[in-house]
Image: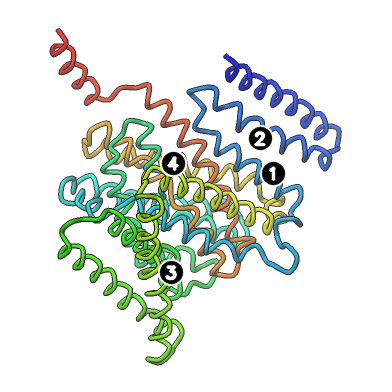
C-alpha cells in the first residue's frame, strides 16, 4: 500500500510540474521551465513503475530527463574542463555491444536453419524498408544535407537489442528475433556502408572501407569479446570444441584487421600493431575478465546480467545526452519536423514489417517479431558512425531522437499486443485445460 501511495504521489507531482512548466512556456518564460521539466520526467520515471501497463517506460523517462537537461544546459554536457564528452561515445557503445555479445552464443545463429523463411523475410524487410522510407523522407522534406544523412543512416544500420526485448514483452517469437538481430548485425559491415554510400552519398561523403572498419571496431569485435566471455564463463567440458571456437574468433580478428591496412594505407608493421591491440582488447581481455568473474563472483550470471544491463542503460543515456547537447542549435531549427518524421519512419517500419510477414502467411508471433526487427534499428551504432564521420552534432541528431522514441512506441505496441493472444496461446490453453480436467 505504501509503495502504491508513493507511485501515486510521484504521478501527482508530475502533473503539478507539467502544469507549472506549461504556464511558464506559454507566458514566454521557457528558460525558467527547464528545471520543472527535468523534475517532471524524474517524477514520471518513478511513478510509472507503479502501473503494470507503463512500468516499462521508466528507462525512457530517464532518457527524456537526460535530453531535457542537455537541451536547456548544453554547456554542462559538451565538455567538462578540457575533456570533450563526445570521446565517450565509442567506448560506451563498445561496452554495450560487449554486454549484448555476453548474453549470446553461436547457438543463436541456429535459427537460420530452424526458421529460414522467417529469418530471410525479417532481414530483408529491415534492410529494404528502413532505407527506402528514409530515402522517401529525405526526398520529400527539405532537411539540411547532414540531417538528411542522419535519417538515412538510422535506416541503414542493423536492428538493435531493444527489438528483442519488445518481442519478449509482446509474446512474439523471441528465438526468431534473436536470430534476425544477430544476422543483421553480422552482415552490417558490408550492407550498412553500401546502403549509406548509395542512398546517403548524395548528402555527405561516405568512405565505404572506413565505415566498414568503424562498424567492425564498434560492434563486431565487442560482440566477439562478449562471445568469448560467455564461452569461458560457461565452463564447457568439451575442451576441443571450446578451442576450435576460440581459434575461429582469433582468425576473424586477424582477417578483419586487414581492412585496417586498406583504410590507413599502412605496412605489415602497422597491421601487426593494430592486430595486437585488437587481440589484447577483444580477445585476451575478455578471457581474463571471465576467469576473474568466475573466481570472485562464483559465476553469478544473474548479478552479471544486472551489471551489464545497468551499464548499457547508463551508456545509452550518456550517448543521447552528449549528442543532443552537441546538436542543440540544429535541433531547435528542425527538431519538430525531425521528431514527426522519426515517428513516421518508426511506425512505417512496424507496419511494413508486419505486412510483409502477413503477406507471406507467417504465424502471428512471427509477424510481431518481424515488425519490431524492421522498425527498431541500432540507434547507438548510428550515433557512433555519426561521430566517426565527424558530424555528431548534425548527422547524429536523427539517431539521438529515434533511439528514445522507438522505446516509447515499441513498448506501447508490445503492451497492446500482449493483451491480444496469438493462435499458439489459444492452442496452449486448449492443451492445458483438458489436462486439468
- Looking at the rendered structure, which numbered label has been put on residue 68? 1
Q: Position of residue 56 (x, y in %)?
A: 49, 32
**Cα separation between marks 2 and 1:** 9 Å
**Cα separation between marks 1 and 3:** 31 Å
Q: Position of residue 346 (x, y in %)?
A: 47, 43
**Cα separation between marks 4 and 2:** 27 Å
**Cα separation between marks 2 and 3:** 35 Å
Q: Position of residue 248 (x, y in %)?
A: 23, 69
Q: Earlier in the sequence, mark 2 or mark 3?
A: 2
Q: Earlier in the sequence, mark 1 or mark 3?
A: 1
Q: Secondary structure at mark 4?
A: helix
Q: What residue did someone put label 2 on?
A: 41
Q: Residue at x 35, y 54 (%)?
A: 294
Mark 1 vs 3: CB contact within 8 A: no
Q: What residue did someone put label 4 on?
A: 348
- Point out the frontmost of discs 4 and 3: 3
10 Å neighbourhood of mark 3: few (<14), some, or many (≥20)? some
Mark 2 vs 1: CB contact within 8 A: yes
| For residue 76, side relative to residue 307 (left or right) | right
- Point out the frontmost of discs 1 and 4: 1
Q: Secondary structure at mark 2?
A: helix
- Point out the frontmost of discs 4 and 2: 2
Q: What residue did someone put label 3 on?
A: 217
Amino acid at each position: 500500500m505504501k509503495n502504491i501511495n508513493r507511485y501515486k504521489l510521484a504521478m501527482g507531482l508530475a502533473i503539478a510540474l507539467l502544469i507549472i512548466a506549461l504556464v511558464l512556456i506559454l507566458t514566454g518564460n521557457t528558460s525558467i521551465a527547464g528545471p520543472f521539466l527535468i523534475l517532471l520526467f524524474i517524477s514520471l520515471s518513478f511513478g510509472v513503475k507503479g502501473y503494470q501497463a507503463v512500468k516499462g517506460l521508466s528507462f525512457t523517462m530517464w532518457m527524456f530527463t537526460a535530453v531535457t537537461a542537455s537541451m536547456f544546459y548544453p554547456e554542462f554536457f559538451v565538455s567538462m574542463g578540457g575533456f570533450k564528452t563526445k570521446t565517450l561515445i565509442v567506448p560506451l557503445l563498445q561496452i554495450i555491444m560487449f554486454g549484448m555479445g555476453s548474453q549470446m552464443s553461436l547457438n543463436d545463429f541456429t535459427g537460420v536453419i530452424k526458421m529460414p523463411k522467417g529469418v530471410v523475410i525479417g532481414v530483408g524487410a529491415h534492410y529494404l524498408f528502413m532505407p527506402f522510407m528514409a530515402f522517401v523522407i529525405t526526398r520529400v522534406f527539405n532537411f539540411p544535407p547532414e540531417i538528411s544523412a542522419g535519417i538515412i543512416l538510422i535506416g541503414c544500420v542493423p536492428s538493435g537489442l531493444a527489438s528483442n526485448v519488445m518481442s519478449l514483452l509482446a509474446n512474439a517469437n523471441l528465438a526468431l528475433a534473436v536470430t534476425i538481430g544477430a544476422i543483421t548485425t553480422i552482415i552490417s559491415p558490408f550492407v550498412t556502408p553500401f546502403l549509406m554510400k548509395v542512398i546517403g552519398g548524395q548528402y555527405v561523403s561516405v568512405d565505404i572501407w572506413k565505415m566498414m572498419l568503424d562498424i567492425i571496431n564498434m560492434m563486431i569485435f565487442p560482440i566477439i569479446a562478449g562471445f568469448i566471455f560467455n564461452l569461458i564463463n560457461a565452463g564447457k567440458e568439451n575442451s576441443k570444441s571450446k578451442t576450435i571456437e576460440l581459434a575461429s574468433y582469433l582468425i576473424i580478428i586477424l582477417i578483419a584487421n586487414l581492412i585496417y591496412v586498406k583504410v590507413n594505407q599502412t605496412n605489415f608493421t602497422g597491421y601487426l600493431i593494430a592486430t595486437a591491440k585488437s587481440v589484447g582488447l577483444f580477445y585476451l581481455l575478455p578471457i581474463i575478465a571471465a576467469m576473474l568473474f568466475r573466481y570472485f563472483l562464483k559465476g553469478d550470471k544473474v548479478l552479471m546480467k544486472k551489471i551489464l544491463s545497468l551499464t548499457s542503460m547508463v551508456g545509452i543515456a550518456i550517448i543521447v545526452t552528449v549528442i543532443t547537447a552537441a546538436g542543440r542549435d540544429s535541433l531547435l531549427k528542425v527538431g519538430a519536423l525531425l521528431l514527426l518524421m522519426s515517428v513516421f519512419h518508426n511506425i512505417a517500419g512496424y507496419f511494413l514489417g508486419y505486412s510483409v510477414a502477413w503477406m507471406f502467411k507467417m504465424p502471428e508471433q512471427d509477424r510481431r517479431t518481424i515488425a519490431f526487427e524492421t522498425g527498431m534499428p541500432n540507434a547507438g551504432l548510428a550515433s557512433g558512425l555519426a561521430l566517426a564521420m565527424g558530424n555528431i552534432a548534425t548527422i547524429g541528431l536523427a539517431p539521438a531522437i529515434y533511439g528514445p522514441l522507438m522505446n516509447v512506441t515499441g513498448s506501447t505496441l508490445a503492451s497492446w499486443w500482449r493483451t491480444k493472444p496469438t493462435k499458439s496461446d489459444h492452442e496452449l490453453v486448449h492443451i492445458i485445460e483438458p489436462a486439468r480436467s
